[in-house]
Amino acid sequence: MSAPLVRFRGVAKSYDGRAQAVAPLDLEVAEGEFLTLLGPSGSGKTTTLMMLAGFEEPSAGEILLDGRVMNRVPPHRRGIGVVFQNYALFPHMTVAQNLAFPLEMRRMPRAERDARIARALAMVRLAGMAERKPAQLSGGQQQRVALARALIFSPRLVLMDEPLGALDRQLREQLQLEIKALHAELGVTILYVTHDQGEALTMSDRIAVFHQGRIEQIGPPRELYDRPATAFVAGFLGENNLLPATVLGADSGVLRCRLSGGAEVLATGDATPGEALLVLRPERIALDGSGANRVPGTVTDAIFLGDQTRLRVALAGGQAVTVKQPHREGERMPAPGDAVTLCFPPEAARILPPQRT
């Protein structure tokens, strides 16, 4: 197995002796990988990216790029492309001049510069806009220019810090797919920072979920979604019902659990008898169907969202459960006050340790 392109070894960051923004971190990024650092504001993900870019200096540990320690290497000598949320384009320069800037810094001949600019503009679908100024472009077009500038000198590694955060939802989703397609086409390694869970699930080979300066869990999107390791990951990555439960015992790998209202259910996970947390995705719950688990409740709220109806269901123990039901024309959905039975298989319910504070 080849050595990783990027390696963090015991890297930590603190400011003025206060609590660590990033706790000692060990992380490897493979060549050609799309790794997303996902987490809420203040979780340490952007600080981690900035240390790799060279804009922040680690308080401890080493950062290696292709086996070379980068701690004392200035940003402009790291050969890394960077894309920011605010585009960071030179307003007095044309699009072509913005794209030429990193090539001129590398003393690239004029003919090769021109050829690369033409290819880069075609790559991001901006051919014919070379002579426009940033102010003459839309937000999405400006971000395409910023992306082209980060890729134009053929870096092996590109860092992206919330690059789509300033765009509206439709454009953001469109550019997510475009960035993903460019990654597949170019084979460049991308380290991407976002707080948007859907963005991370859509684009990433792996996701590192940050919480309080640490990586809470790292793995492929489907693994994190289906098998969260902690209550924080379960609650942050997508929508989940987190229900206090008591593990009663296990039989052939299936856990017997009791919810606070007295209902007993079967679940999966690695837990010993005692207090725990049951994690259940809203879309895995059926109403009044069949299944090993059948929990009665009462609908307290029903919201039609077009492709689905979102229900809130109160259980006997006072817990509220969210249920997502796909919209089918002509089918009646339960209304507030209706009694329903929540049905789900054991593999849809996962047991985790109680949520830490």
Image: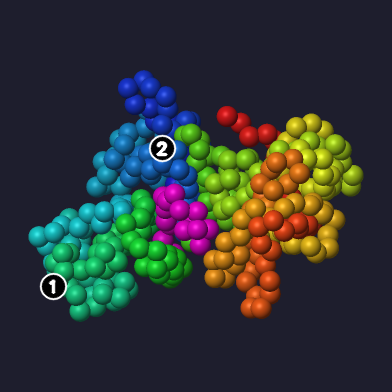
Q: Residue 344: x percent and y percent?
A: 77, 57
Spot the residue most to the right. 251
Residue at horizontal 24 percent and vertical 68 percent from the top: 138
| Residue 194 covered by magenta stretch | yes
Residue at the (76%, 44%) spot, across then down: 316
Residue at 29 percent across and 40 percent down: it is: 55
In the rendered image of this protein, does residue 308 appear above or below residue 270?
Answer: below
Instruction: Between label 1 and label 2, give the one nearer the viewer.
Output: 2
The residue range painted magenta reads 186-202
Give the farthest residue toward the top.
Answer: 17
What is the crowding at mark 2: few (fewer than 14 residues within 10 Å), some, or many (at least 20)? some
User: Is residue 286 positioned above or below 330 on the image?
Assistant: above
Where is mark 2, residue-wise?
42
Residue 272 can be seen in this image: no
In the rendered structure, the answer to whether residue 123 lies left or right of residue 337 reads left
Residue type at the position of mark 2: Gly
Between residue 266 and residue 148, name the one nearer to us. 266
The residue tagged with tag 1: helix, strand or loop? loop
Residue 131 numbered tag: 1
Q: Nearer the viewer, residue 329 or 91?
A: 329
**Is residue 237 among what the camera can see?**
yes
Q: Does the magenta segment cover residue 316?
A: no
- Check the picture and name the quadrant holding the C terminus: top right
The local secondary structure at tag 2 comes to loop
**Residue at the image position 66 percent from the left and 44 percent from the top:** 242
Give residue 263's quadrant in the image: top right
* Residue 241 pos. (x, y %): 65, 48
For the residue pair 136 and 161, the one nearer the viewer reads as 136
Distance from label 1 to label 2 (Cα)? 39 Å
